Image (cartoon, helix red, strand yellow):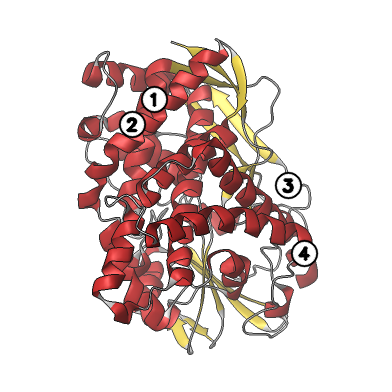
Amino acid sequence: MRNLIGWLNPQNASVERIDLKKKRFEPAHPVYYKGPGGRPIRLLLHARANLLAIWRKKHYETGIGVMWIFRRQVVVVNAPEAIKYVVATRHENFERKSPQMRRALEHLIGDGLFISDGDTWKQRRPLVSDIVHKNRVPVFGGIMTGTTEELVERWNRLGDGASVNMLHEMAGLTAEIIARSVFGNDLGADGANEVTEGFTSYQSLVDSVNLGYFLGLDEGMPLLRTPSMKHAIKRIHRVIDKVVEDHLAGHGDNRSMLDLLIRRQKRNPELKLDVVALRNEAATIFMAGHETTAATLTWIWYLLSRAHWVETAVHEEIANVCGDRVPSVDDVPALEWCRAVVEEALRLYPPVPILARQAKTADRIGTHDVKAASLILIVPWLLHRTEELFPDAHSFRPERFMNGKRPLPYSYIPFASGPRLCPGLQFGLTEAILCLAVIAQKFRVRVQEGHKVEAVFQLTLRPKGGMPVTLHRR
């Protein structure tokens, strides 16, 4: 991984393979780049199109790579022990998110937990962690199941064989679940659509490559707030602001996450959770909570649509565990196939496939000297598809996560790792398992014939153009 300057794939070609006899499915992923190297400006231009399509085969091997892009040192860390050093051992030196990520999200979530650092992060992390702690997840299980049942009922009214865009459907579902959990009341179709469509628009307008940062500006260039971007932000903030204001006026559900934040602020004024801070944390929880699970579920329906043998195992498990009744949060521990499918989908398609950090001071990762303000890239997309860590790494094999099998520490990090491990991990994992079980009990989902699936990364990892599918009652 020493010469990383040739990460270019201008064709963005994608590959998908299936062998029914061997029950082997290799879902869509960009082909390895095999062309000539290029100048840094070419690298940045192609990275703007799709950051997943710039890697050569050798980059899917364990190691540490170092390169310079103009005036910025870039270090790619793709070895479990080195990742542990960055995210845990030397966390305080590498805790800060990259300027690209902070610039891309600051107008949307302000100083929310996802992009904050220093004292703000230290103060709010325990607070948010308590709110979404795994011990609280059962409280929200009924919301997860009930909201998914409503979706199933709506699909039934569409008729057998109906066509939908699964990305949009899953985004609406998870937006409503997180809204009822975080805000304590229904957003309704209009509110959920405002946030879902607003974020989709926002993603399409954000440039994930900040040229100013590579030219030497340690904070990068400010995001250009075009009229379209302002409109997308306004759509999201309008919904969230109203809910926060309603809660502050005493109209909130006292079981909601947001209301817990408000009551905590009243007991501890030193937290300084004013309306703006509350909105930022509510927006952070909402965006992280609904977008990542929506993307994961969308990829799951694609995977099951192709790997019918896995789909059959999932259906049999649901029948054995739940019978004819609707799956509930109490069933989650027994839904081993469902959990394994979710975890394997997260391995193949991590919602945030590149975790970028900025070094505060000079350091040494492995045998490589790292300059202050260097860009450190931990890439779950590469890590999870490294053959040394996951044999037959590009294939969909949920069995990797069954019968007590667990990956090597720091080799599987779809929710990040170390102190910045996603506090909503158990919430999101339980939500995905329940949504999968409730829907799979009633429907088979098939990707529409002729649709080419392609994974693209902007702020999150999504299928290009969504996922058009047909719904078939079981």
Residue 365 image point, x, y percent: 44, 78
Labelled pair 1, 2 in contact (Cβ < 8 Å): yes
Quadrant of the snapshot with the N terminus: bottom right
Ranked by sequence position, the earlier of labels 1 and 3 is: 3
Say what amino acid the circle numbered 1 marks: Glu
Residue drawn at x 26%, y 76% as measured from the top left: 268
Ranked by sequence position, the earlier of labels 4 and 1 is: 1
| Snapshot quadrant of residue 331 | top left
State the residue position of label 1.
149
Residue drawn at x 37%, y 78% as measured from the top left: 272
Q: Nearer the viewer, residue 394 or 154?
A: 154
State the residue position of label 2.
145
Residue 27 image point, x, y percent: 56, 34
Say what amino acid the circle numbered 2 marks: Thr
Say what amino acid the circle numbered 3 marks: Asn
Determine crowd level at label 3: few under 14, some 14-19, many 20+ residues with C-alpha closer than 10 A. Answer: many
Residue 444 image point, x, y percent: 48, 17
State the residue position of label 3.
12
Is disc 1 placed on a helix, strand or loop?
A: helix
**Mark 1 vs mark 3: in front:** 1
Ranked by sequence position, the earlier of labels 2 and 4 is: 2
State the residue position of label 4.
226
Is disc 4 placed on a helix, strand or loop?
A: loop
Residue drawn at x 27%, y 68% as measured from the top left: 264
